[in-house]
């Protein structure tokens, strides 16, 4: 049944889109605050996966506790890295990008050195499958999706209702004006970066039980985050939501009808076209 | 650096040091195969020559203030163009080089036309996407590129009846290419156009304000830099005899960026120095590839902060300091004497009210 | 005295908000015109439109009887309209010499391929550029600092270098954006003298945006006042003080920007 196949892929596309969204939001947040393309973002996803492996499979902590631990640690590590490594390059995005490329190399190959190239698999959190009419969805996927929904809701509440979140949004919109309003933009850099890192790590942690963990797992999510953010518009959070849902669905639908390599090429062509004709993305502002 | 902008060496001296450094590096490169009859050194010297060609092109683009992440892809386009022309059409070497150079220049011009109006970050992202698209296309178009299997059996360089079959003869070709491109970079950077490059990199708005078209300057840098990568790619294909798409992906671009960052983005000797220091690294750390990448990463993290002008700039600064110490501080004395003599220039300059010089790739 | 610059009914909107609404003004050959107004009156917007850094939403800008609205900034500079900036006025990382040499490039014609082979022509260009830079540095009392990075100069010297940069492009019309903001009274007087001398020596036309009212009235032959993007006055400085609209919009309010 072609119809149910499409519906099935639509659902799994939405689930994947949610995880892309976690990646893209962090990526977009870092860009919004620092105007730097964070090439190390995928490595934080990878480290999140390894963090979960340590907490959940090795220390055998409960899943939710493990995820929370991973998130907390990632925020602190991210803020510390911003302070130690990226701080001298505020206002200098070119060198900032060079530095994040360096960071990505160090993190990925450091992980390779420590953990080796072979994928580590984790015990699954839940088993079984959910049936809804003709649709079958693995329970572990639903679990991951539910978790990411909780995280996303928490993140949006943080941005909307907390003072720190509002300050962060103000800095993303216009640092100059934020400063005039008395917001300490200097703090937004480490914590914005830390939060972005934390979101990437959570995405990695949630994905880890579904697939496996290796030093290279961050590469694809980084690419997807790039694409989502370019589609949706840099620094635009609603744009990131739209972009990741589009990408998640087209990914899994195209996976059925097109060969994987053609789908990949199409994605890059799409990215180039969007950047050329609408560089602020589908929902981004017109200021360029 | 602890010594602030105030003690920067005079441009004349930095230039002298740069010249000496560049010449020494070229001589080292030329003498490398003579160190031992071990063909490993010859192999290394050839790779350094090729990397110098690639890095010089990237250095030119960086000099205009842009970070290109598809430089490796342009090397690949050149390599494939050369290989296909040679294998399928039995084209002569000079034709391969000319065609690859023109193809890369045309691609860069097309891409540049569309994106050079974009701000720095967006430019970088498009080049990244373009690089990935090229790699995927090479993988996908197997009728042209042999797909993931790559192209094998690319013959030696043939020029006017002479076959550069031996490693040493190829080395001469590569050395000639590297020296030529270094010289070209040197003349370009020191010409009026080189001045315009520096202006655009440092402050594009001000550059436009004084009548320099930032767009044209960036276009020129991107086209010339990418075209030279294509020409180098042809040489690479002939040297290796075998090419595959994965060799020209993002990692190659990152390696080349590391060379430019380490060597220095503002001096013509920078890319040469970077290639000289970093090319042997994989051979030295053959067992532990991770370690090599970690070292590259550390260079990318630390050099922009510690030596914003790379090795070339650092050696120049060190030479100036040594010169000052040896000669009892003439560099210190001279401006003071001038200061007294110049009645028109009043005011104390030691404590600058203005913000310190911005860290930028354009510092001369 | 012929008209050099003619701005006719120029408007510029930012997201529905009119930063400039149907403003007309003109600058004659050799004339010094001031452009004043409270914060957000559209002065810098007007300057940016004339110099090509912003496109006007409507209206025309004619320079030497040629429409220049919408041309890129570098082309307008080549036609002979130079500007200084409020904030970033110099290439901070480059030496004073290189700063001026970059600006002097515009008037140097050179063959690209001649440069690639380091030809004789290229060296000749270099020589004329050097002579020009040295003369300018002399004129602006910057000769001692030629080999210093511009960013290490004092604020006052950077401001002076900013004007020298603009003049290196050999303009006929010079647009100055708050040339004396942040300078002390003595430096202000020096700057006024310098500008007067330059203007007379080169028969320059000046259009200057400035908050410092004494500076404007002392230097300008005519002053245009803007408020909320509209022109409210266009008169010699002496008549300006008696114009009720100007008094209310500008002189009446606190001069908070005079720092």
Image (tube, grey):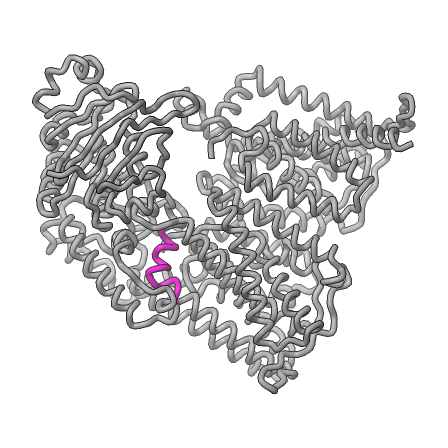
Dividing the image into 4 quarters, which one contains the N terminus of chain A?
top right
- The residue located at (65%, 59%) in the rendering is B248
- Side (left or right) of B184 relative to B51: left
Camera-nearest residue between A14 and B356 = A14
Whether C168 is drawn above or below C213: the answer is below
Q: Is residue B196 magenta?
A: yes
- The residue located at (77%, 51%) in the rendering is A117
Residue A120: % across, % down: 81, 43
Q: Is the magenta region chiefly helix, strand or loop? A: helix
Residue located farthest toward the bottom when viewing the structure as drawn: B161
Q: Is residue B191 magenta?
A: yes
Whether C52 is drawn above or below B70: the answer is above
Whether B124 is drawn above or below C225: the answer is below
Locate residue A50: give its quadrant.
top right
Residue C32: % across, % down: 14, 35
- Side (left or right) of C208 relative to A68: left
């Amino acid at each position: 049944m072609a119809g149910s196949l499409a519906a099935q892929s639509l659902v799994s596309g939405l689930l994947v889109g949610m995880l892309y969204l976690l990646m893209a939001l962090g990526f977009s947040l870092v860009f919004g605050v620092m105007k730097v393309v964070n090439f190390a973002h995928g490595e934080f996803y990878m480290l999140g996966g390894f963090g979960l492996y340590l907490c959940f499979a090795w220390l055998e902590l409960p899943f939710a506790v493990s995820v929370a631990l991973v998130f907390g640690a990632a925020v602190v590590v991210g803020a510390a890295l911003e302070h130690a490594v990226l701080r001298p390059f505020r206002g200098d995005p070119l060198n900032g990008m060079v530095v994040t490329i360096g960071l990505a190399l160090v993190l990925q190959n450091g992980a390779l050195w420590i953990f080796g190239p072979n994928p580590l698999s984790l015990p699954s959190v839940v088993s079984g499958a959910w049936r809804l009419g003709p649709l079958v969805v693995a329970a572990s996927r639903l679990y991951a999706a539910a978790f990411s929904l909780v995280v996303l809701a928490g993140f949006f509440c943080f941005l909307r209702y907390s003072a720190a979140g509002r300050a962060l949004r103000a800095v993303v919109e216009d640092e100059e004006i934020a400063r005039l309003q008395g917001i300490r933009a200097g703090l937004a850099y480490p914590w914005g970066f830390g939060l972005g890192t934390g979101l990437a790590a959570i995405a990695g942690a949630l994905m880890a039980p579904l697939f496996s963990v290796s030093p290279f797992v961050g590469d694809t999510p980084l690419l997807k985050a790039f694409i989502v953010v370019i589609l949706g518009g840099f620094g635009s959070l609603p744009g990131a939501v739209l972009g990741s849902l589009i990408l998640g669905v087209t990914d899994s639908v195209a996976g059925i009808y097109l060969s994987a390599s053609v789908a990949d090429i199409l994605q890059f062509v799409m990215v180039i076209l969007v950047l050329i004709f609408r560089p602020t993305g589908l929902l981004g502002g017109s200021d360029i | 650096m602890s010594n602030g902008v105030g003690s920067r060496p005079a441009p004349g001296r930095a230039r002298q040091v740069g010249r000496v450094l560049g010449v020494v590096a070229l001589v080292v490169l030329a003498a490398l195969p003579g160190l031992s009859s071990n063909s490993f050194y010859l192999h290394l010297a050839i790779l350094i020559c090729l990397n110098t060609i690639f890095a010089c092109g990237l250095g030119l683009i960086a000099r205009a203030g842009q970070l290109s992440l598809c430089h490796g892809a342009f090397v690949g386009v050149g390599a494939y163009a050369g290989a296909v022309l040679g294998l399928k059409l039995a084209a002569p070497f000079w034709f391969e080089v000319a065609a690859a150079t023109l193809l890369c220049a045309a691609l860069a011009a097309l891409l540049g036309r569309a994106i050079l109006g974009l701000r720095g970050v967006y430019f970088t992202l498009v080049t990244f996407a373009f690089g990935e698209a090229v790699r995927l296309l090479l993988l996908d178009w197997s009728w042209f590129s042999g797909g993931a299997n790559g192209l094998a059996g690319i013959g030696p360089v043939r020029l006017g009846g002479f076959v550069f079959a031996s490693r040493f003869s190829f080395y001469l070709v590569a050395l000639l290419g590297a020296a030529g491109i270094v010289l070209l970079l040197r003349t370009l950077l020191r010409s009026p156009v080189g001045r315009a490059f520096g202006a655009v990199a440092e402050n594009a708005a001000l550059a436009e304000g004084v009548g320099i078209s930032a767009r044209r300057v960036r276009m020129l840098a991107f086209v010339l830099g990418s075209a030279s990568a294509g020409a180098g790619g042809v040489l690479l294909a002939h040297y290796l005899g075998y090419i595959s798409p994965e060799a020209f992906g993002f990692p190659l671009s990152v390696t080349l960026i590391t060379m430019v960052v380490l060597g220095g983005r503002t001096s013509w000797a920078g890319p040469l120095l970077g290639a000289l220091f970093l090319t042997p690294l994989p051979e030295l750390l053959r067992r532990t590839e991770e370690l090599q990448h970690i070292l590259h990463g550390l260079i990318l993290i630390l050099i922009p902060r510690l030596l914003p002008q790379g090795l070339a700039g650092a050696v120049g600064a060190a030479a100036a300091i040594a010169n000052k110490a040896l000669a009892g501080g003439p560099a210190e004395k001279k401006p003071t004497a001038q200061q007294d003599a110049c009645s028109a220039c009043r005011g104390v300059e030691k404590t600058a009210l203005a913000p310190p010089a911005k860290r930028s790739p354009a510092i001369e | 005295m012929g008209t050099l610059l003619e701005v006719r009914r120029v408007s510029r909107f930012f997201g529905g908000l009119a930063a400039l609404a149907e403003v007309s003004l003109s600058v004659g050959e050799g004339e010094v015109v001031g452009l004043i107004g409270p914060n957000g009156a559209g002065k810098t917007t007007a300057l940016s439109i004339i110099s090509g850094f912003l496109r006007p939403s409507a209206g025309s800008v004619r320079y030497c009887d040629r429409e220049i609205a919408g041309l890129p900034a570098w082309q307008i500079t080549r036609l002979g309209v130079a500007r200084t900036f409020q904030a970033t006025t110099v290439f901070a990382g480059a030496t004073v010499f290189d700063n001026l040499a970059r600006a002097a490039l515009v008037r140097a014609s050179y063959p690209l391929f001649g440069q690639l082979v380091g030809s004789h022509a290229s060296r000749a260009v270099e020589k004329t550029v050097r002579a020009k830079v040295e003369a300018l540095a002399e004129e602006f009392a910057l000769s001692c600092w030629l080999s210093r990075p511009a960013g290490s100069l004092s604020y006052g010297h950077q401001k002076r270098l900013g004007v020298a940069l603009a003049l290196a492009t050999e303009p006929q019309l010079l647009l100055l954006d708050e040339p004396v903001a942040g300078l002390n009274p003595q430096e202000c007087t020096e700057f006024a003298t310098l500008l007067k001398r330059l203007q007379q020596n080169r028969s320059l036309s000046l259009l200057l945006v400035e908050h410092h009212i004494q500076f404007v009235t002392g230097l300008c032959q005519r002053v245009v006042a803007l408020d909320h993007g509209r022109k409210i006055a266009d008169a010699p400085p002496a008549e300006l003080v008696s114009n009720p609209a100007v008094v209310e919009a500008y002189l009446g309010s606190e001069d908070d920007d005079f720092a």
